[in-house]
Amino acid sequence: MLLTIQSPRKQKKTDPNAKSNYETALEAAKTIKTEMKIVPVKTLQDAINYLKNNP
Protein backbone atom coordinates (compact mmCIF):
# COMPACT_ATOMS: atom_id res chain seq x y z
CA MET A 1 0.00 0.00 0.00
CA LEU A 2 1.22 3.49 -0.81
CA LEU A 3 -0.36 6.61 0.64
CA THR A 4 0.20 9.74 -1.42
CA ILE A 5 -0.51 13.30 -0.39
CA GLN A 6 -2.25 15.18 -3.18
CA SER A 7 -0.57 18.29 -4.55
CA PRO A 8 -2.17 21.71 -4.10
CA ARG A 9 -4.38 23.17 -6.82
CA LYS A 10 -2.04 26.16 -7.14
CA GLN A 11 0.50 23.95 -8.88
CA LYS A 12 -2.06 23.04 -11.56
CA LYS A 13 -2.72 26.74 -12.16
CA THR A 14 0.94 27.54 -12.76
CA ASP A 15 1.69 24.34 -14.70
CA PRO A 16 -1.38 22.68 -16.27
CA ASN A 17 0.72 19.59 -17.05
CA ALA A 18 1.77 19.09 -13.42
CA LYS A 19 0.89 15.70 -11.96
CA SER A 20 -0.02 15.01 -8.37
CA ASN A 21 1.91 12.49 -6.31
CA TYR A 22 -1.15 10.26 -6.64
CA GLU A 23 -1.11 10.42 -10.45
CA THR A 24 2.62 9.73 -10.52
CA ALA A 25 2.21 6.80 -8.11
CA LEU A 26 -0.60 5.31 -10.23
CA GLU A 27 1.56 5.49 -13.34
CA ALA A 28 4.50 3.89 -11.53
CA ALA A 29 2.29 1.11 -10.16
CA LYS A 30 1.04 0.33 -13.66
CA THR A 31 4.58 0.41 -15.04
CA ILE A 32 5.92 -2.09 -12.50
CA LYS A 33 2.68 -4.11 -12.61
CA THR A 34 2.23 -4.17 -8.86
CA GLU A 35 -0.92 -5.09 -6.97
CA MET A 36 -0.10 -2.38 -4.44
CA LYS A 37 -3.07 -0.24 -3.49
CA ILE A 38 -2.50 3.48 -4.11
CA VAL A 39 -4.49 5.66 -1.70
CA PRO A 40 -4.77 9.43 -2.12
CA VAL A 41 -4.86 11.50 1.08
CA LYS A 42 -4.88 15.24 1.67
CA THR A 43 -3.14 15.39 5.03
CA LEU A 44 -0.85 13.33 7.21
CA GLN A 45 -3.75 12.89 9.62
CA ASP A 46 -5.84 11.43 6.76
CA ALA A 47 -3.04 8.92 6.15
CA ILE A 48 -2.85 7.99 9.83
CA ASN A 49 -6.63 7.57 10.01
CA TYR A 50 -6.62 5.40 6.90
CA LEU A 51 -3.88 3.17 8.30
CA LYS A 52 -5.66 2.82 11.66
CA ASN A 53 -8.94 1.86 9.98
CA ASN A 54 -7.48 -0.43 7.29
CA PRO A 55 -4.94 -2.79 8.90
Image (tube, rainbow, N blue to C red):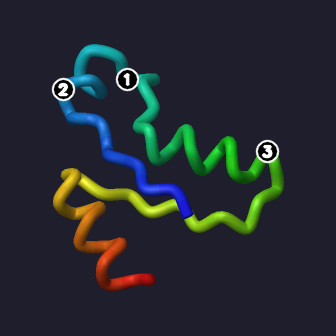
Give the percent coordinates (x, y) of residue 40: 38, 58
Q: Which residue is mark 2?
A: 10
Helix, strand or loop for disc 3? helix
Q: Residue at x 43, y 56 (%)?
A: 3
Distance Cα–Cα, label 3 vs label 2: 28 Å
Q: Quadrant of residue 39?
A: bottom left
Q: Earlier in the sequence, mark 1 or mark 2?
A: 2
What residue type is disc 2 on? Lys
Residue 41 versus residue 48: which sits nearer the camera? 48
Q: Which residue is mark 3?
A: 31
Helix, strand or loop for disc 1? loop
Up the image or down, 36 lies above or below 27; here it is below
What residue type is disc 1 on? Pro
Q: What crowding class fits label 1: few (fewer than 14 Cα within 10 Å), some (14-19), or many (20 or more)?
A: few
Q: Residue at x 46, y 47 (%)?
A: 22
Give the percent coordinates (x, y) of residue 33: 82, 56
Q: Please give the count of numbered marks on the rendered protein.
A: 3
